Image: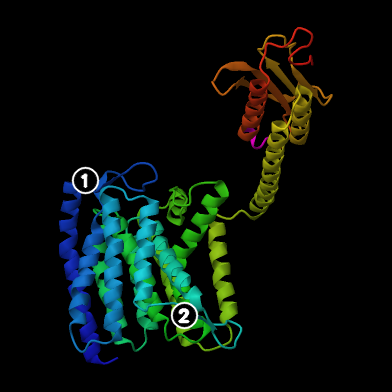
Amino acid sequence: MTVRLIYYFISYFAAALVLALVLTPAMRTLGFKLGAVDRGEGRRTHTGVVPRLGGIAIFLAFAVPFGFSLTRGDWDSFHGSMLGVLIASAIVLFIGIYDDLRGAGVRNKLLAEVAAAGIIYAWGIRIDVITNPFGGGPYTLGWLSLPATVLWIIIITNGINLIDGLDGLAAGTGIFISVTFFVLAGSDFHLQLAYVILAGSLAGFLRYNFPPASIFMGDSGSLFLGFLLGATSILSSYKATTFATVMIPIIAFGLPLTDMFYAVLRRYYRGMPLGGADKEHIHHKLLEKGLSKKKVLMVLYSVNIAVMLGALLLIGKKTSMDILGLVLIVGAAVFGLRLLGYIKFMPFMKDLFRSHAVNRKRKYFNYVIARFRQEAARSDTIDDLWARLSELVKEYGFSYVEIYLDIPSVKNPAYVFSDGEARSDSMMLSFPIFDTDKRYLGDACIFKKADDDYFLCTAEMVRAITEEVSRFVEKHPSPAPKDRQFLPSA
């Protein structure tokens, strides 16, 4: 790298830095005026009221000098590609601004990200091939190139968005990733300049976002930063040929990807919305250990530096240890999660197997309920209906069931089932039975052993019993003829 090129990079870095230093206080004032603020409550790690429109300052501090750089020299394919990146990034920025001001919702943000990623693909920035880690030629993706490109960009965008829960973390992580990709870009001067300018804009913003932060980047900043890094990382990997080089983008995004991967697993495992919020991100776990926000930030910066150094080492090596290196990195990540209390192997495995068994049982009960409904609908006599109901309660493993009907000529209880066991150690569920006009028909009482693990699909089972009994009563209305009861005695 020549002295002139170094001077060129420093000049643009300084321009972005100064712009961010000037624009960020202005965005802080604007955030207060517009009410785009975060209040220190719930899962937040701060106290007080902090504005969250810092993303606009980051975008302008990046777009102005980089846009100026695109006007210099002859227009080539890179200029066209980066123009597409700027346009698509602006779309993501605007949905982030709307979310900071009014709340956009997970669905709308995802749709905007998909649309913006589609623009990136249409502009020719694509993941076309996947290198074979075991040798041989690369795999051409063909039509899978579109979903691979869109998915990669969305994953990175939301990975950066998820770690933006601690002062200075997303901005600092963005700087470290920019440095890594600066080296990965090699002799691609234009792409290197993009990372230099991005690092400058983030450094200027970090002056106000370092703990205790006086402004947040908000969704406008975290979505823009993640989207820009996700899109440009594809450009950085265009000339990659070895497995190690192809893996560098994944390794460089190690912290946000790890945090997002575990967040998705955690929420899916607990039945929570995947786009929901909780207080179990990596920075939350470190705060629970008693560390201050500054110390947590330094710990995570250290992790970023270690990841960056690992990626840079992979850039310079040409050995056959690629798979082993990846295994070591994954092992280190698992070990770190274990130290934070994320992974408790034996309880996790027990819960995993139990969850699998419960899900299988739930599917079976849904089948049993559906079968009961079909057969009950075909029942012509009350004896047929009670026979179908007996099959249902046996499959559920109930120990005792009674049904009382408030209908003339019915001798109560109208239905009784017992498995012969004592009911002293059982749980009881009691619910009324209504017809379709919400008129009271009677009650049902169900007993089940307290030590039984499976009391699943209860709502579905209750609904099936009440609806099928009321349907039968409506099909065979009372009063009954004098020579026979409407319902037989139990």
Location of residue 375 by image quarter: top right
Determine whether, in the image, residue 163 is placed left or right of residue 461.
Answer: left
Left or right: 66 with respect to 427? left
**Residue 468 percent coordinates (x, y):** 66, 28
In the image, farthest residue toward the top = 482
The answer to whether residue 229 is left or right of residue 282 is: left
Residue at 54% x, 85% y: name it: 138
Q: Farthest residue to the right: give it.
A: 420
Query: Helix, strand or loop at disc 2?
Result: loop
Residue 86 visible in the shown view: yes
* In magenta segment, residue 455: yes
Mark 1 and mark 2 in contact? Answer it, CB < 8 Å: no
Residues 235 and 304: in front is 235
Front one among 131 and 483: 483
- Does 441 appear in magenta? no
Q: Which residue is the site of mark 2?
A: 128
Residue type of the residue flagged with mark 2:
Asp
The relative height of residue 1 versus residue 301 in the rendered view (above or below) is below
Magenta stretch: helix, strand or loop mostly: loop
Residue 438 at what x, y percent from top left?
54, 20
> Is the residue marked by circle 2 packed among few (<14), some (14-19), or many (20+) residues within 10 Å?
some
Highlighted range, magenta: 454-458
Residue under label 1? 35
> On the image, which quarter does residue 85 sit in?
bottom left
